Image (spheres, rainbow, N blue to C red):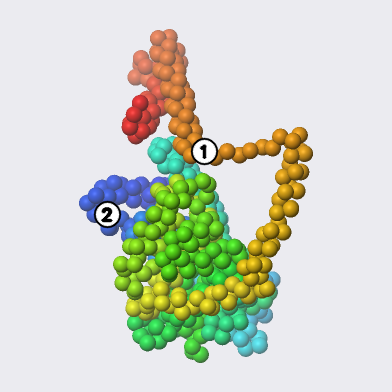
Amino acid sequence: MLVTRSRLPRSLQIAVALSGFGWTWWRHRHRAPDTLPDHLRRTLEGLGTTFVKLGQGLSLRRDLLPAPYLHALESLHNRVPPFDPAQAVASIEAAFGQPVDQLFAEFDREPFAAASVAQVHRARMADGRVVAVKVRRPGIEAQVTADLRLLRRFARIAQWLLPGLGRHRPLELIDELAQFLRQEIDMVQEARNMRRLAGTLDPLPYLTLPHVIEPMASAAVIVQEFSHGAPLATHYRTSRGRELAGLVLDAYVHQLMGAGVFHADPHPGNLFELPDGRLCLHDFGSIGFLDPVSRAALAQLIEGLVVGDAATVLDAVVAMGFIEGPFDRHAYLRGISEILSNMATLPLNEWSMADAIWRVACIGAGENFRLPRHLLVLIRTLFLAENTLRALDPDLDLVQALRARADTMVQTLKQQSPGRPIHAQLLHGAEQLPILASQMLRQLRLEDGRPSLSLHHRGVQSLETTLARTGNRLALALITLGLYVAGAVMMLHGSGPLLWGHLPALSAVAFAAAFVLSWRLVRAISRSGHL
């Protein structure tokens, strides 16, 4: 369990910390807004593991937070001391059912690294291999579960007090972040991710990752190969840094366009150079996936951005799933052309593919914007990878680098669908037409020859929303009126316990509830701008 100095109940710790940030935001949102992202980062770090990991998950949501907050959340880390080595030994023995002395020829009881989720011990196997034993903090799973339960309660209260929060769907956001957090603290999931990536990276001579020492992986402990390497930060702005930037770019071209599984946290702290010059990836709590259609669309998107073809870019983002529902194609083409035109004026070493993809996806004020989790992970990975590339080689011309790798991307995609040239794909599509016709006839038979038609009309969704809000306000007004009447009746009869000797308690409760509902109703109407 993560130790905290405060003796307050956990719910009060969270409430005090979040309220403190809310008050600071209210005071400084106009006078010193630049200080707020770092204040949010410190607040989450002070609340411990759950909120550190939730903040890191929230850094995926570029659709919700401005860039300064995203940068602050990406750098979240919790400085915590290591826990008692005796607890680590107990966890290892419970996980594998044997004493540590039988599992390892040597085991260093003092950890060489400690973080908010786990700490790492060096050990030696009986066959002489040096390994890293990663042990999850005792009690962290129970703490995370309790914190998430409290966070959902706070979200419900905040949503009730501030109805405007509803459009951001805070409870759904918490559920999404909770899923991210549970995967982060599950060592079995991390071992599974490592095995999945090993099949993709092992064939590459310039890239590697530490492998799981089978079968030593459980929910609380994972044993993996020990990697001796130097952090990439030691090579910033050097000739070797430029070479490593090329390796990082090659690695992600292979992962994204090849098997469609990729390391989703490529910040410099997770990338090392081994003594033999290979690039080594670390930390596999989060990986991303792209299906074959998305990989082909991503390649098409990169091509469209590089050559400045708005139509190709639009087709690609639609194929990837960033845009859904009926939309104005001409308006999107105009918006994309403007983005491409602005990009053309940037110096080549400031050109950002990740930023371009994000700006294209957000065209139209988000009306048709969609961002499922696999695309969230992709966007964050692209931003992190670009930041790492810029740190290694500030003068990197990303456009030229991608052009130089265009043939590699095409060949990699072809390897995933061998023997399927364009004409073969067209023939395959034609072969599907009889199947589609058969399905339509079967549907007609099931519906007595009366096909069901789906009609899409622009503007209907906003009308439905307006009608729903109007109905809610009418219902709220009726309830409020009923409370006022009930309070007045109870005051006339004077029944029940009295407050201050003359005010019926039940009447006071009715008036208080009616006042709160009246305030919400007036506030909602004033925000809409009209009665």
Q: Residue at x 41, y 66 (%)?
A: 308
**What is the quadrant of residue 511 in the picture?**
top left
- From the top left corner, tell me how far across and down residue 432 is, in percent: 71, 56
Q: Residue at x 34, y 77 (%)?
A: 394
Left or right, 140 with respect to 100, comes to left
Q: Residue at x 34, y 62 (%)?
A: 341
The residue labelled by disc 1 is 457
Q: Secondary structure at mark 1?
A: loop
In terms of depth relative to the viewer, which is nearer, 46 or 315? 315
> Marks 2 and 1: in contact by CB < 8 Å?
no
Q: Is residue 66 visible?
A: yes
In terms of depth relative to the viewer, which is nearer, 222 or 309? 309
Residue 478, relative to residue 88: is it above or below? Answer: above
Tell me the crowding category of disc 1: few under 14, some 14 to 19, or many 20 or more residues within 10 angstroms, Cα based.
few
- From the top left corner, tell me how far across and down residue 278 is, in percent: 51, 85
The residue labelled by disc 2 is 33
In terms of depth relative to the viewer, which is nearer, 256 or 229? 256
- From the top left corner, tell me how far across and down residue 120 is, in percent: 52, 74
Q: Is residue 286 visible?
A: no
Q: Amino acid at mark 2?
A: Pro
Residue 154, relative to residue 298: is it above or below? Answer: above
Extreme residue toward the bottom, this view: 276
